[in-house]
């Protein structure tokens, strides 16, 4: 049996009803897609500290009140690595969102979210975040980010 290889990641979704702040990824994994802000958890770093650091680096704002709303696991067919993403909803922050080398931020009304230019799993769980629900999910991607299987559940606690 192959050992599960999990990579811990964070994702902050800046949400001030009815607007959400997304960033256009300018380089690296996910380039050319709108996404929340986040990234890898460094050795010795808590998941929350990583979420705060990555958001500061990517969009120049300070987030303190992190509300953990979801954990999703992404697996890509033919790759043993599992990306475990800890998702936080953030409704207030310090500073002005600004473009970085990695991300170009833009506010969207929740009715105008560019799902066609986002990861294909986002359309399933982002509405739960907007509704104030907590969730856990697993998505298996095939070629061209087609979802081969998904399992998304609303949960009481994470």
Image: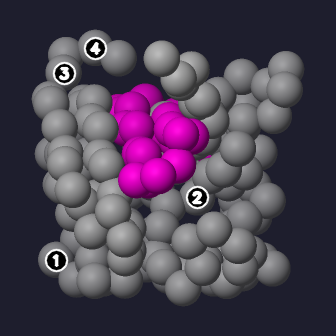
Dot 3 or dot 1: first in sequence order is 1
Q: Main secondary structure of the magenta part?
A: strand
> x, y percentage for residue 60?
75, 64
Tell me how far mark 1 sits from mark 2, CA to CA: 20 Å
Which residue has dot 3 on it? 155
Task: Please report contact status of discs 3 and 1: CB closer than 8 Å, yes or no.
Answer: no
Query: Neighbour class for label 2 at 10 Å: few (<14), some, many (≥20)?
Result: many
Which residue has dot 4 on it? 157
Which residue has dot 1 on it? 111
Dot 3 or dot 2: first in sequence order is 2
Q: Nearer the viewer, mark 4 or mark 1?
A: 4
Query: Neighbour class for label 1 at 10 Å: few (<14), some, many (≥20)?
Result: few
Tell me how far mark 3 sits from mark 1, CA to CA: 25 Å
Q: Nearer the viewer, mark 3 or mark 1?
A: 3
Please provide the residue range marked out in magenta.
Answer: 62-85
Q: Nearer the viewer, mark 1 or mark 2?
A: 2
> x, y percentage for residue 157?
28, 14
Q: Is residue 77 magenta?
A: yes
Q: Note whether 116 is above or below 28 in the view shown.
A: below
Task: Please report contact status of discs 3 and 4: CB closer than 8 Å, yes or no.
Answer: yes
Q: Note whether 83 is above or below 123 in the view shown.
A: above
Q: Helix, strand, or loop for circle 3?
A: strand
Residue 153 figure quarter = top left
Query: Neighbour class for label 3 at 10 Å: few (<14), some, many (≥20)?
Result: few
Dot 1 or dot 2: first in sequence order is 2
In this view, the residue in front, 151 or 113, is: 151
Q: Which residue shows up at 58% across the image and 30% down it?
A: 6
Q: Which residue shows up at 67% across the image and 83% down it?
A: 26
Q: Which mark is residue 37?
A: 2
Q: Is residue 149 magenta?
A: no
Residue 67 figure quarter = top left
């Amino acid at each position: 049996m192959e050992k599960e290889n999990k990579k811990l990641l964070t994702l902050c979704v800046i949400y001030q009803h009815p607007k959400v702040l997304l960033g256009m990824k300018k380089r690296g994994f996910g380039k050319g897609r709108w996404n929340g802000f986040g990234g890898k958890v460094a050795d010795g770093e808590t998941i929350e500290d990583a979420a705060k650091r990555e958001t500061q680096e990517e969009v120049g704002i300070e987030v303190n009140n992190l509300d953990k709303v979801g954990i999703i696991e992404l697996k890509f067919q033919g790759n043993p690595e599992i990306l475990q993403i800890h998702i936080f909803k953030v409704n207030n922050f310090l500073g002005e969102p600004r473009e970085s080398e990695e991300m170009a931020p833009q506010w969207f009304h929740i009715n105008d979210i560019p799902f066609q230019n986002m990861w294909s799993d986002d359309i399933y769980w982002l509405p739960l975040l907007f509704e104030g629900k907590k969730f856990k999910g697993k998505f298996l991607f095939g070629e061209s980010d087609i979802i081969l299987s998904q399992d998304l559940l609303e949960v009481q606690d994470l």
